[in-house]
Image (cartoon, coloured by chain):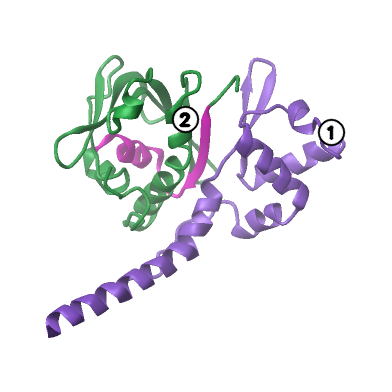
Amino acid sequence: MLCNREVAYYVPVEEVFKALADGSRRTLLDRLFAADGQTLTELSGGLDMSRQAVAKHLGILERANLVVTLWRGREKLHYLNPVPIREVQDRWISKYAHSRLDALAELRSRLEDNS
Amino acid sequence: MSRPQHVYVTYIAAAPEQVWQALTSAEFTRQYFHRTSVESDFRKGSPVVFRNPDGSVAIEGEVLTADEPHCLAFTWQVRYDPELESEHPSRVCFEIDHAEGVTRLTVIHDEFEEGSKVYERIREGWAPILCSLKSLLETGHPLPTAGNQAG
């Protein structure tokens, strides 16, 4: 039942993993998860990172489609986009869940057939 | 939070017209959107209803913008959960752009009331739905678990 259904990756999945591989970038994602829609200034506050470093990391996250920016007036707001992470989950984790569920269902119907 | 909104972006290897059709026709929404069938003529001011298989209404709203196949926006009033029904309607906007041979779908869900429970509850909702929509358009199959649980 689980065949090779390949969906298109506009952003290569390596870019998503590379973006997530850095602790500072994960911290930025944590911050957006806690409070979405922050400016560069807000994200840089209270972090042991220069504003330029934060901007660089946000750029990498944006190219990986993990962060999306929207302009609101003169403010550029950053939003966490969970879709690429969900695509990874659907590619591997859900498949394993399905295999287990299928195996259990099959076992059950065999037991019921035999009783 | 001064500007609560959910923003999602996914890239789909399909034409903008196909993405539009998937968003606006029951034949498609039934497959990726919690088995609901969308009903609307998608004219500005018209009602929009997402109907459960048992006939009850899951979501309803009013069309704000319908610029086929570029931009679709409607209000979002939850009916599937009595705890959430009392909130003011929020707003969903779908932007469909096409560049470099791929269609980018941006979903912005905003205009939540202060302290909105809907905002928290749907936080995880859109990503599996959009991934299933993408899979449906690209492979002909929605994702088995994503966006297909009842209720």
Chain holding disc 1: A
Percent position of residue A44, x then y? 79, 32
Q: Tell me which amino acid carries mark 1.
A: Arg
User: Mark 2 or 1, which is nearer the eye?
Assistant: 2
* Chain to which mark 2 belongs: B
Q: Which mark is residue B146?
A: none
x then y, percent, for residue A65 = 60, 44
Q: Residue at x 42, y 48 (%)?
A: B128
Looking at this view, is B49 or B140 the one in front? B49
Residue B123 to residue A75: above or below: below
Give the CA distance from mark 2 to mark 1.
Answer: 30 Å
Q: Secondary structure at mark 1?
A: helix
Chain A drawn in what color? purple
Q: Residue at x 17, y 42 (%)?
A: B53
- Between A49 and B132, which is closer to the camera in this rendering? A49
Q: Which mark is residue B119?
A: 2
Q: Residues within 10 Å of mark 1 (few under 14, many from 20)?
A: some
